[in-house]
């Protein structure tokens, strides 16, 4: 067990995943056929030996509450706990619904924990990171805060509106800005921070005083001169699922065999809730390649380059290409679709063609009938 | 959920020696089946779905894996207060020395104290090595309605196969008049499925008597059922229709797996109303590579397929490399099929690595080839 409290933050204002977010926060959305986005960050924490985790939920908590049970994430549930914290105070206006507001209203619960450190991570990023190594680095460096970042080479089209970092030779942050897509190469903050409980409390308290609209990253930017803000570089895949395009691209990127096995393997399992679905049946005459598929599907049609969720049925004659299909959807006979994101429980029939683009994948809503 | 006062006892001590390497280190009920299951998942899930809360699993042969497996009772939802799954191996007692279970009936006799503690009113005797979906609650209703002392689940089998089973001869109300174990000339085609409900008080009396009888085989089919009949007790035959399979041999295990490839199979594992539960598996989603070619397959979590699969079943975490061709075969957990391998009518045993270019099985062979570590090392 690691001496740190895990806090999973709410998503910031710039997260706008068209359609998907009308039904649940992106963190509770289905990804890679059998997971929810939040499974990655939760598994990062429990695999790192963080057994007390508070998950903050901003709104529409049903999906998250239904999904998360401490018993699913391989912790000693007597010594540890995964708790869902919902903003206790009413929110007058959505712009006041900041992470600082949520953190401060739940501060008394964080203070219950005797752990001296806080690992705070976002719920709308997907990456694999051993927090033990990052914590070790943090303690050794003597910095007040350590920020996890990634060297990004396509920042002109991804991680938009995320924080960019300027780092000096001592690996400390000297400047923070927003990524407005002007440069290809940027150091992008993964909005993951390690600090002592005291520093955490001090920052949240002072942010409240400065502005009711402040986010945690705002107070961090204000503190560059007064605090030692160090960095820790993340290697490997990372994505910020702030738009439908980003969600679609991340699904397609992780789908590649090499990436998938780097992120999900026996040494670093990704935990999720079981659904007790049987394996997938590929019926005679079906065609499939270059895809990842959840259990419980019945594939009769043709599928290529797709992410197919649990319990999806693809009927005879249907041609599904470059799509992300979330669980429990039905694609009926002879439907042709390309570059679509189909939300859960959708039923698609009687249509000649549905087509999106890489820039704008076509979203089909939860439970929609087309 | 209603709790009924029926306690299930699953006989899971069988060795299954005709499954050879598959049961070398684990008992037959623990053998993997259908991609992600173990055979015993079917009876355990039937119990859970039939609202039974207390289940005893009688273990003997290679019980280490199986006893820890069934102890994880939450996997089947059998973890209500006052209930649970109990692994029952032979044990030393205050009044008797350690002795193996001498027969199916003796296994229950040795656990009379367990049934007493559970306050059983009815006892359901099951085999842990059958594949079927059945509602035992309905069977109990029939047992109570007929005022029977014992109810035996039966199914119709083809006349020519009837001599392989215990056969019931019944009157027009399905009351059992005669029971014949593997008769040479069967008088009916109603075969016992090895699923019995007993009124516990009566069963206990007969078990105690059977225990004293040194001539007895201490077996339900050979001794207890005939004793019930000889005493003129009311025995009911309960007719079952649907999929039922005893996978005692390599061929029948293969066949049962192949049944899953038929979209219209009687064994419907997709039915959300009667799910088969199993231990949670951590593997990632299955990955079908760009060079894969799949024509009728049943594939589960963690598999990575880059070769060609035709009419085959792939179990958890198995890998099929580029250029390999797998036809009419079953590839068990964690097996790896190398490049350009040819497999036809095989069962590849759990964890076996088939080297690149190897060739096993034959499409014209009558028997199914069991591809074991030993077999693979012989060709290498």
Image: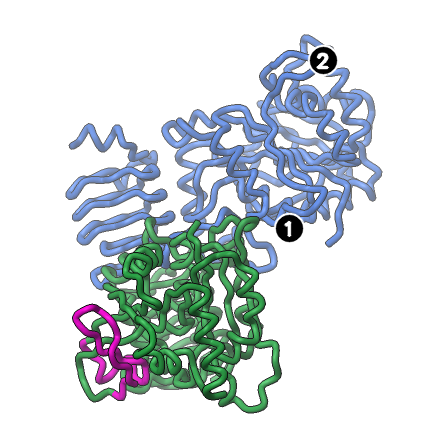
Chain colours: A green, B blue
Report the Cα–Cα distance between label 2 and label 1.
Answer: 37 Å
Q: Give the letter of the chain under mark 1.
A: B
Q: Is residue B74 visible?
A: yes
**Mark number for residue B95?**
2
State the extent of the magenta-drawn residues as a range.
A153-180
Q: Residues within 10 Å of mark 1 (few under 14, many from 20)?
A: many
Is-magenta flag for residue B181?
no
- Please name whichever residue, B199 or B182, is drawn nearer the observer in this view of the structure: B199
Q: Is residue A317 visible?
A: no
Q: On screen, B17 above or below A63?
A: above
Q: Residues within 10 Å of mark 2 (few under 14, many from 20)?
A: few
Residue B56: name its quadrant. top right
Where disc 2 sits, the SS reads: loop
Q: For the stretch drawn in magenta, what is the main secondary structure? A: loop
Q: Residue tagged by mark 1?
A: B49
- N-term mark: 2 or 1: 1
Is residue B290 toward the left or the right of residue B157 in the image? left
């Amino acid at each position: 067990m690691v001496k740190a409290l895990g806090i999973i933050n709410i998503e910031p204002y710039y997260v706008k995943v068209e359609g998907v977010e009308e039904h649940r926060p992106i963190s509770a959305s289905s990804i890679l056929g059998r997971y929810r986005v939040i499974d990655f960050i939760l598994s990062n924490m429990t695999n790192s030996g963080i057994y007390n985790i508070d998950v903050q939920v901003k709104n529409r908590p049903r999906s998250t509450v239904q999904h998360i049970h401490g018993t699913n994430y391989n912790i000693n549930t007597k010594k540890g706990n995964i708790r869902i914290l919902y903003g206790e105070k009413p929110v007058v206006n959505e712009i006041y619904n900041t992470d600082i507001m949520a953190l401060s209203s739940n501060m008394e619960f964080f203070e219950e924990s005797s752990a001296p450190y806080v690992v705070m991570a976002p719920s709308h990023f997907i990456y694999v990171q051993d927090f033990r190594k990052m914590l070790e680095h943090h303690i050794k460096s003597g910095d007040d805060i350590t920020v996890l970042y990634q060297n990004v080479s396509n920042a002109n089209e991804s991680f938009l509106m995320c924080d960019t970092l300027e780092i000096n030779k001592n690996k400390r942050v000297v400047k923070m800005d927003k990524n407005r897509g002007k440069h290809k190469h940027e150091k992008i903050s993964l909005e993951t921070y390690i600090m002592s409980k005291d520093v955490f409390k001090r920052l949240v308290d002072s942010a409240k005083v400065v502005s009711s609209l402040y986010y945690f990253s705002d107070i961090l930017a204000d503190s560059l001169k007064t605090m030692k803000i160090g960095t820790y570089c993340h290697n490997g895949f990372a994505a910020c699922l702030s738009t439908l395009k980003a969600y679609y691209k991340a699904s397609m990127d992780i789908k590649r065999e090499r990436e998938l096995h780097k992120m999900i393997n026996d040494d670093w399992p990704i935990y999720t809730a079981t659904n007790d679905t049987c394996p997938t049946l590929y019926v005679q005459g079906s065609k499939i390649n270059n895809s990842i598929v959840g259990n419980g599907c019945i594939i009769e049609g043709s599928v290529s380059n797709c992410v197919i969720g649990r319990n999806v049925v693809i009927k005879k004659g249907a041609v599904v290409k470059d799509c992300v299909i979330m669980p429990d959807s039905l694609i009926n006979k002879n439907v042709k679709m390309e570059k679509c994101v189909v939300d859960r429980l959708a039923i698609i029939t009687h249509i000649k063609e549905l087509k999106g683009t890489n820039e704008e994948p076509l979203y089909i809503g939860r439970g929609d009938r087309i | 959920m209603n709790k009924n006062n029926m306690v299930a006892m699953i006989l899971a001590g069988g060795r299954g020696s005709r499954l050879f390497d598959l049961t070398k280190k684990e008992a037959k009920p623990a053998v993997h089946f259908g991609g992600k299951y173990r055979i015993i998942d079917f009876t355990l899930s039937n119990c859970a779905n039939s609202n039974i809360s207390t289940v005893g699993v009688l273990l003997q042969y290679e019980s280490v894996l199986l006893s820890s497996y069934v102890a994880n009772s939450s996997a089947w939802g059998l973890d209500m207060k006052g209930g649970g799954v109990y692994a029952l191996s032979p044990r030393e007692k205050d009044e008797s020395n350690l002795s193996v279970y001498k027969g199916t009936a003796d296994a229950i006799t040795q656990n009379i104290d367990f049934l007493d503690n559970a306050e059983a009113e009815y006892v359901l005797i099951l085999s842990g090595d059958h594949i079927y979906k059945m509602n035992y609650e309905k069977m109990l209703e029939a047992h109570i309605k007929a005022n029977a002392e014992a109810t035996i689940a039966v199914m119709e089998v083809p006349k020519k196969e009837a001599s392989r089973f215990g056969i019931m001869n019944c009157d027009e109300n399905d009351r059992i008049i005669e029971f014949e174990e593997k008769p040479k000339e069967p008088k009916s085609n109603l075969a016992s499925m090895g699923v019995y409900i007993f009124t516990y008080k009566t069963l206990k009396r007969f078990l105690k008597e059977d225990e004293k009888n040194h001539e007895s085989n201490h077996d339900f089919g050979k001794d207890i059922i005939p004793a019930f009949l000889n005493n003129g007790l009311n025995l009911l035959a309960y007719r079952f229709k649907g999929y039922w399979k005893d996978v005692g041999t390599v061929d029948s295990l293969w066949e049962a797996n192949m049944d899953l490839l038929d979209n219209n199979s009687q064994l419907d594992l997709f039915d959300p109303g009667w799910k088969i539960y199993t231990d949670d598996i951590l593997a990632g989603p299955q990955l079908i590579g760009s060079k894969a070619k799949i024509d009728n397959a049943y594939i589960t979590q963690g598999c990575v397929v880059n070769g060609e699969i035709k009419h085959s079943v792939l179990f958890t975490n198995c890998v099929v490399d580029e250029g390999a061709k797998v036809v009419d075969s079953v590839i068990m957990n964690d097996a790896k099929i190398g490049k350009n391998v040819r497999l036809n009518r095989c069962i590849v045993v759990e964890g076996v690595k088939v080297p690149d270019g190897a060739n096993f099985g034959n499409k014209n062979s009558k028997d199914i080839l069991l591809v074991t570590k030993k077999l693979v090392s012989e060709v290498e």
